[in-house]
Amino acid sequence: MGSLLASHFHRLVLATFVYVLEIAALLGFLATGPSIELILVGCVIIGLSFGFFLVISRIGKYIDDRLPLIRSPNYINAESISTPLM
């Protein structure tokens, strides 16, 4: 099922769908009336997860900005390749 969805939708559409489902799960959790301790633990988990992925993305950008561009004659830039329509 994942390959079927991935072949028909752009990755950002799928990412947005995941965000919508996560928000629905959070609202469902809050609708059950949990104790304040559970709400605080949930906030800590969400905050730490956000911080972790923010740090990972910044590290990736830092590394990507410092990598040399490949200028080999054997290097194929996939973005510049166009295929004829049949």
Image: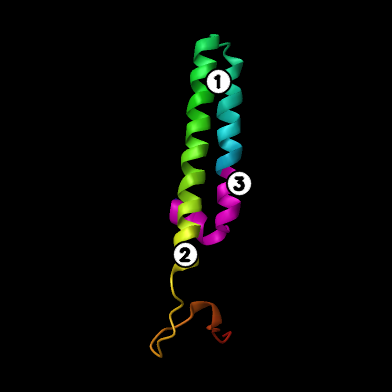
Task: Give the class, few, some or many, for how many residues have Cα within 10 Å of label 1's Cα (few <14, many ≥20).
Answer: some
**Mark 2: which secondary structure?**
helix
Mark 3 is on which residue type? Answer: Thr
Mark 2 is on which residue type? Answer: Asp
**Mark 3: which secondary structure?**
helix
Give the percent coordinates (x, y) of residue 52: 46, 40
Q: Residue at x 57, y 26 (%)?
A: 26
What residue range appears in magenta? 2-17
Which residue is tagged 3? Answer: 16
**Residue 63's image quarter?**
bottom left
- Residue closest to the eye, 17 or 52: 52
Which residue is tagged 1? Answer: 29
Mark 1 is on which residue type? Answer: Phe
Query: Which disc, if any, is residue 64?
Result: 2
- Residue closest to the eye, 70 or 66: 66
Q: Residue at x 44, y 85 (%)?
A: 71
Question: Would you say the residues marked 3 and 1 are in contact, meaning their CB atoms lie under 8 Å apart?
Answer: no
Give the percent coordinates (x, y) of residue 44: 50, 25
